[in-house]
Structure formats: C-alpha cells, structure tokens
Amino acid sequence: MSLSCVSAVRKGFVLVLLTGIMIPSLMASEKAGRDNLQGNLVSLTEIESMALISGSRVKSAEAGHKIYQARKRQHYGRLLPSLSFNAAIQATEKDPGEKTSVSSLSAEVSLPDPWTFQNQGRQVDVLNEKAELETQLERAELISTVRKQYYKILYQQKKVNLKQELLKILQRVFEDTRKRYYSGLIHKLDFQKARLSLIQTTSEIENLNSVLSSDKQKLTELVSGPDFRKARFSLEGYLSDSGQLSRLLTGDFFTGLRQSKSPHLQLQETLLKSASLEAEGASLFYMPDFRLSAEKPTDKKASDGMTFKAGVSWELFSGGRDYYSYREKVASKEKQSHLNEAAKKDWLVRFDSLHHSLILSLSRLELQFNIVKTWEEMITLSSERFSRGLAEYRELSDDLEKFSLQKEKLVDLQSTLWDELIEFSSHCGNSELFRKFAS
C-alpha cells in the first residue's frame, strides 16, 4: 500500500475517533443518560410517593402520631366530671317480727384537679408534637435514602454509557488495526493491544451492568414497589449554574440555613418541654382531690330532704415517695437540657462539615471539568499526530484510555456532589431544599 493510501486510512481512522469521543459541556453532560435506559420512564417524584406509601417505618411513625392524637382527645374528655349513681336498701329488725327498711339513691361527682389536669393536658400536647416531628423525620430519612439510591443508579448508568461509547470506538479501532496488521502496516503488538483493550472494556461493561442491576434491586426493596431493573429513570434537575450553587452555599441564604432549626433540633426542644412538664407535674403531688355527692332517701318514713356532701382527699405523708419522684423528674429535665446543648453543637458541626464537603466537591468538579476539556484537546492533537505518521497507535490508544478514565472520574464527582446535596438538604430538615440546589 502506498504512503498516500496509508495517510488516507489514518485520516479516516482519526475522523471516526473524533466523532466518537468529543464530549459535550458540563451542563449537557449532566443531562446525558436520560434516554439511554429501556422500559417505562419513572420519575423521582413517583418513586418518592411509592416509598412513602409502602415504607414500614413511616407507617409505624404515623400510627404513633395517631395514638397521641387519640390520647389528646381522651385527656380532654376527662375535663367532664365523673358521675356515678348508687342505690341502697338498709333493713333493720328491732324486735322479732318487726322489720324496718330504708332505701336511698345517691349520686357522686368527682372533679378533676385543675392544676394536674392542665399539666397533663400540656404534656399530651407536647407528646403529640413529638410524634409529629418523629413522623416528619422518618419521612425525610426515607426520602433521602431513596434519592441517594436513585441518583446512584443514574450515574452508574452514565458510567455504563461512557464505557459503551468507548467500546464502539475500540471496535472500530480493532477492525482498522486488524486490517492494517494483516496488510503488514503495523506491528503485532499494536494488534494485540487493540484486541486486549476490546476484551477488557467488554468485561468492565459487564461488571458495571451487574452493579447497576444490583442498585436497581436495592431501590426496588427500598420502595417495596415494582421491579425497577427494566425501568427508565429521568434526571430531575441538573447543575445548570455552578456559580449559583456557590452563591447559595456562601451568601445570606447559607447564613439563614445555619441559623434555622431543623426538625431534629425541634424534636430535642420538644423532649426538653416534655421533661419540664413531667417535673412540674411531679411537683403537684401535694394537691388535693375533690369530691361532691348528693343522697336522697326514697322510703316514705324518711325525710323528703336531700343530703349534700363535699369531700377533700389530701395525702399528707407518703414516706417520701412523691418527693423523690419529683427529684427524679427534675434530674431528668437537667439531663435533657444538657443533651439539647450537645445536640445543637453536633448539628452545627455536622452542618459545617457537610458545607465544607460541598464546597470542596464543587471545586473538584470544576477542576475535573477543565481537565476533561484539556484532555479533549490533547486527543485532538494526538489524533492529528497519528494521522501525519508522527505517533504510533500505542500512544493514541493510551491517550484514549486515559481520556475515558478522566470522563469516568467526572461522572463520579458529579454523583458525589448530588449525594452530598441530598445529605445537606436532609440535615437542614428541608427535603425541598435539594430541588432548590438542583434547579
């Protein structure tokens, strides 16, 4: 074959390579992979709804909330007086054959202790608030787990897509290399290297698909819904403006997030309220109980009048049992107060740690994008050198593999950033905050 023919073959080969390896911008790369899955399209919102409906821990928390709502209604039902009726007949035999009997009807009303009743009512309200916050936290945790798994699948699919793109290029390379090897234009080492690259990439795709299938199975188990292994997922939101994300993480919006109270901190405050009310309720052990009763004889010989009685029950000494119960509740309140302070510090430490990780991940992502763009230019130059006969295939092949690895690293960094955004949103207690970042 003449040199002109060899040059033509090289140029045609380079053209095939360049049309297969050019990558889009970072934003377009974020959108890539939406339509590459087979099966029915399932959105993240739909999967979240399925998870909330079928989640056993969420159902348990919701049932607990219903229990405290019922207790709240039950408690306020005690506000009504307790009313009881009694009927009695008394027979007396003074002399043989002479019997007298007296019958009567009586009613007794027990009045609730107003101090204790008010304290218990506030305790029920706080417990109801606690159950509501626990339900909210269970939902948020489930949503966060589902979102992480969802985006893990999306980016695993993107890695599969990248490998498949590389495989197509390597298949073309192998066919071209095989022809050139049998024509005596290249060394056998180049042919064997092209063949080995093809085999290795095929094996890597199988491994990646196996991990992808496993990830989809995990999502199916999380949601307890349909089998998602053949489903097609859509990427809801993408990092359309990394500068905007940086501003959200450093401006007034970030300051407001740091000063806000997440449901986790609200739950700790609710536990402190509950401990305070329990201590207050235990301090009411000296308060009396009140009773009011009325009795009317029904016997004709008896007086037609009605007798009213008012009673007070007051426990003056209980061997210190009530007092030390009160001291126990006071100590529990102090303990919960210290736990609250520790929870606030831990929350801020975790918040700052997640924020720092986000800033670093964003910087790494921008840097990696620039690296990939630089590699794209290098591949173009390397291909041109190959087309002019100034470089061997081995050099171009090595560059292609390195370029592919850099693109995979970019996908991994994108996946990490999404994961951290979801975790940060969950920590702040606002599941919709994630969508503000990923608008």
Image (spheres, rainbow, N blue to C red):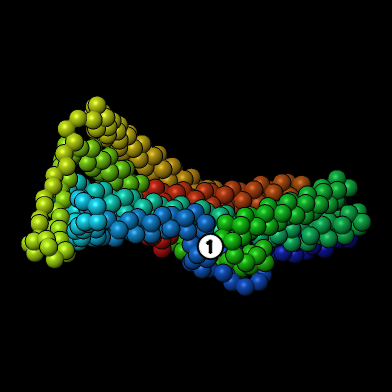
Q: In terms of image quadrants, where is residue 357? A: top left
* Picture residue at 83% right of the left edge, 52% below the top: 195
Q: Quadrant of the C terminus?
A: bottom left
259 with respect to 287 (left or right): right
Q: Quadrant of the N terminus?
A: bottom right
Q: Residue furthest bottom?
A: 40
Closer to us: 271 or 37: 271
Dot 1 falls on a residue whose secondary structure is: helix
Closer to us: 208 or 167: 208
224 with respect to 324 (left or right): right
* Picture residue at 27% right of the left edge, 56% below the top: 75
- Percent of width and height locating residue 302: 11, 61
Q: Residues within 10 Å of mark 1 (few under 14, many from 20)?
A: some
Question: Which residue is identified by label 1?
Answer: 54
Q: Identify whether 236 is placed above or below 115.
A: below
* Picture residue at 36% right of the left edge, 52% below the top: 131
Q: Identify whether 326 is placed above or below 153.
A: above
Of the residues shown, which amino acid type is indicated by label 1? Ser
Q: Residue furthest top?
A: 319
- Percent of width and height locating residue 285: 20, 37
Q: Residue furthest front?
A: 96
- Percent of width and height locating residue 306: 9, 60
435 with respect to 123 (left or right): right
* Picture residue at 88% right of the left edge, 60% below the top: 179
